[in-house]
Image (tube, rainbow, N blue to C red):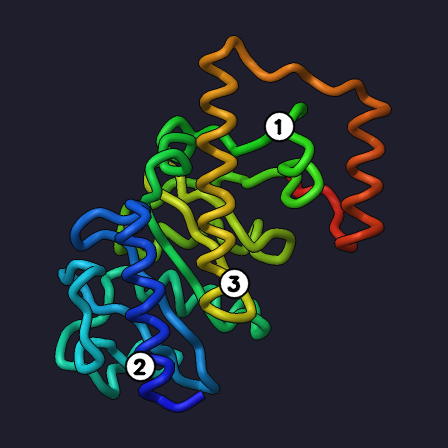
Amino acid sequence: MKKSDIKMEIIKISKKLYDRQMVNSNEGNVSIRSGDKVFITPSQVCKDELTEDMICVTDLEGNQLEGSMKPSSEIGLHLHIYKLRSDIKGIVHCHAPYSTAFAIARKPIVSKGYTEMIVLYDKIPVAAYGAPSTPEIYKDVKTYIHQTDAFLLANHGLVTVGKTLKDAYLLSESVESIARTLLYAHLLGGEYPLTQPELNQLYEMRKKNLGKDPVTP
Ligand SMILES: [Zn+2]
């Protein structure tokens, strides 16, 4: 991918996040890894107003190589994830409201009644709390990043990863939709739980079709 195409992809996905109200004003950050370089959104700019010259380029240690502004204050989180999994080429971190509600309540997004959720994700876990923009925020990422492409940051928001930035974005959208649906089910008195044999059938489907094990702990 050409450098300008990478920057345009970041601008496009950032705008989608803003348009779908998954980030407010200057919140959230997205990045793409290309070889040993990381392209990432700058700090303190609305995701609706990014231009190519604002997109920051750094090496894997966070040394800035390009960009008219400072990289996102959460760049440490992105670099940490890229170092832990070399297959990841795109990351979205956002404060999508329904997912973030689960994060603030420190409740994993999990279901015994939503078939699609059970087969696709089993569980969106909550990584331990760390203050924003500090290394503490990603100290627990290693617990989950090898078994799931989506997890919550306690009291903060959602992180999704993918083989492309688009994959990571679509996963964010999907998780947010599921979080919203489960909250609505809660308002209706709670989900109607499937029986253990019915659940086992879905877990088998997950293993057979996606090759995925349960997300633990
Ligand atoms: Zn955040």
Q: Which residue is mark 1?
A: 111
Q: Are marks 2 and 3 in contact (CB under 8 Å)?
A: no
Q: CA distance from mark 1 to mark 2?
A: 39 Å
Image side of residue 168 versus residue 101, left or right: right
Q: CA distance from mark 1 to mark 3?
A: 23 Å
Distance from mark 3 CB to nearest ligand 1 atom below 8 Å:
no
Where disc 3 sits, the SS reads: helix
Q: Which residue is mark 2?
A: 58
- Sequence-wise, the earlier of marks 1 and 3 is 1
Q: Which residue is mark 3?
A: 167
Q: Nearer the viewer, mark 1 or mark 3?
A: 3
**Residue 127's x, y, as percent?**
47, 43
- Sequence-wise, the earlier of marks 1 and 2 is 2
Looking at the rendered structure, the kind of residue marked 3 is Asp
Where disc 1 sits, the SS reads: loop
**Residue 60's x, y, as percent?**
39, 79
Q: Nearer the viewer, mark 2 or mark 3?
A: 3
Q: Nearer the viewer, mark 1 or mark 2?
A: 1
In the picture, the disc for residue 210 is none
Answer above or below: position of 55 versus 43. Answer: below
Identify the image quadrant of the C terminus: top right
Image side of residue 126 versus residue 131, left or right: right
Viewer-nearest residue: 89 or 202: 202
Q: Are marks 1 and 3 in contact (CB under 8 Å)?
A: no
Q: CA distance from mark 2 to mark 3?
A: 22 Å
Looking at the rendered structure, the kind of residue marked 1 is Ser
Residue shown at 40%/69% (left/top)? 79
Looking at the rendered structure, the kind of residue marked 2 is Thr
Find the residue positioned furthest to the bottom. Answer: 2
**Residue 154's x, y, as percent?**
39, 38
Number of numbered callouts drawn: 3
